Image (cartoon, coloured by chain):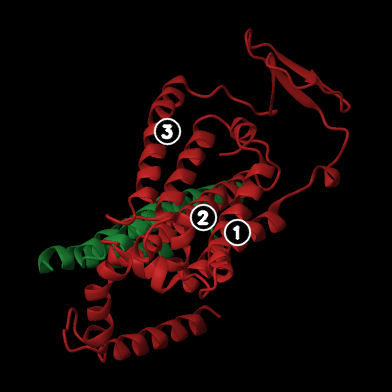
Amino acid sequence: MIWPIDLAILTLVVIAGIGALMVKDLLGAAILFGAYSFMMCLLWSIMGAVDVAFTEASVGAGVSTVFFVAAVFRTSRRTKD
Amino acid sequence: MKIIGLIIVVVTGALLIYAAADFPAWSDPASPASTYLSPYFIEKTMEETSVPNIVTAVLADYRGFDTMFETTVIFSAGVVCFFLLRISRREEEEPETRYYRHVLTGVTIQLKEGYKIPPSADFERIDAVWTPPDLIIKTGCRILIPFIQLFALYVIAHGHHSPGGGFQGGVILGASVILFAISHDLRTAVRRMSEKLIGILCAVGVSIYAGTGALCLLLKQNFLDYSALAGVLHVDPITARSHGILMVEIGVGIAVLATMIWIYNNISSAGRYRQGL
């Protein structure tokens, strides 16, 4: 593991996670969640778990983002809290 | 309520971080997992299953029972989405107004009180808010989709040697069809791949997996012990395990592919199967 890259990606993971929780616009939250998944994918591949990284990239960053966007599109875009 | 939730989250998070300190260090050779389990897989996988990618061998062979129910979980996710969201035609307000578009001239026809045109190549049924798909996006996706699908098939078939397998390949295959549905519209995608076909494929995928296991049972071996297939496939038991892994991976791929499209169709159209995203 190269620690500066590891640290940078971990920081971005935390920022994306907190951002997805805090942001009022649910579409933005879906996109931030996609970014979170992509960072997790990078983290898995740094740790040598390429299979998990592959799954995370295709399921987490790819299809589940589409599902979230579709769900936001069919419900409301703003959260109440 | 919000404060109580925050307290619970903070306490749980603190406990988890406290417990994580007890974990063995990353890539610690003396940790319990690395002392007997990992060396066994690293040393024996190649000679027992002839699969170079240990992850695939563990996932589909040594832990095959676990993966079978993972596939079942995905199958039930698709079924649950269907039962929760799908609105059958009978429950809707009839008689509905239908819109048709003449493909060659682009003339739109409105038919009231449930009249319909029999399905033909000249007319396609469209939604009330139909917009023509953008030419650039449509053509771009049309060029991209075959390559995505080819890559997905490669991922499924090459899971023995490189990262990948049924789950990833199935998701990529499903994503290519979802891309088609986004770039055109949902109606066109459903016309290409009907709801019935998706439902059947979903069940067929799980059945291939469970059927491979049951076939081993019929050939007087344990459930999911693929070496029993040696007689059927005319290979030695070690290669039979490798081929058995490929068979279940194909099953997983089909199930995941169908489930992804099913969930997308139901979510993006709120169960009406009209306009998608």
On whether disc 3 and disc 2 are found on a single subunit, the reply is: yes
Residue at coordinates 29% horizontally, 56% vertically from top-left?
B163
Q: How far apart are marks 1 and 2 (CA)?
A: 7 Å
Q: Which image quarter is the N terminus of chain B in?
A: bottom right
Q: Residues within 10 Å of mark 3 (few under 14, many from 20)?
A: some
Query: Residue A3: which quarter of the image?
Result: bottom left
Residue B147, above or below A61: above
The percent position of residue B191, horizontal first and vertical second, equals 64, 32
Question: Image quadrant of residue B150?
Answer: top left
Mark 2 neighbour density, 10 Å: few (under 14) some (14–19) many (20 or more): many
Residue denoted by label 2: B251
Please say whether residue A25 is visible from this viewpoint. no
Category of crowding for the residue at label 1, using alpha-carbon neighbours closer than 10 angstroms: few (below 14), some (14–19), many (at least 20): some
Residue B201 pos. (x, y %): 60, 48
Where is mark 1, residue-wise? Answer: B207
Q: Colour of chain B?
A: red
Query: Residue farthest to the top?
Result: B105
- Would residue B162 appear left or right of B153 to someone viewing this image? left
Q: Colour of chain A?
A: green
Same chain for mark 1 and mark 2? The answer is yes
What residue does disc 3 label?
Answer: B145
Q: Which residue is drawn at 58% across and 34% down?
A: B189
Q: Which amino acid does label 1 sit on?
A: Ser
For label 3, the SS is: helix
- Separation of marks 3 and 1 at Cα, in angstroms: 28 Å
Tell me the SS state at disc 2: helix
Q: Is residue B256 left or right of residue B115?
A: left
The residue depicted at 10 percent of the width and 66 percent of the height is A2
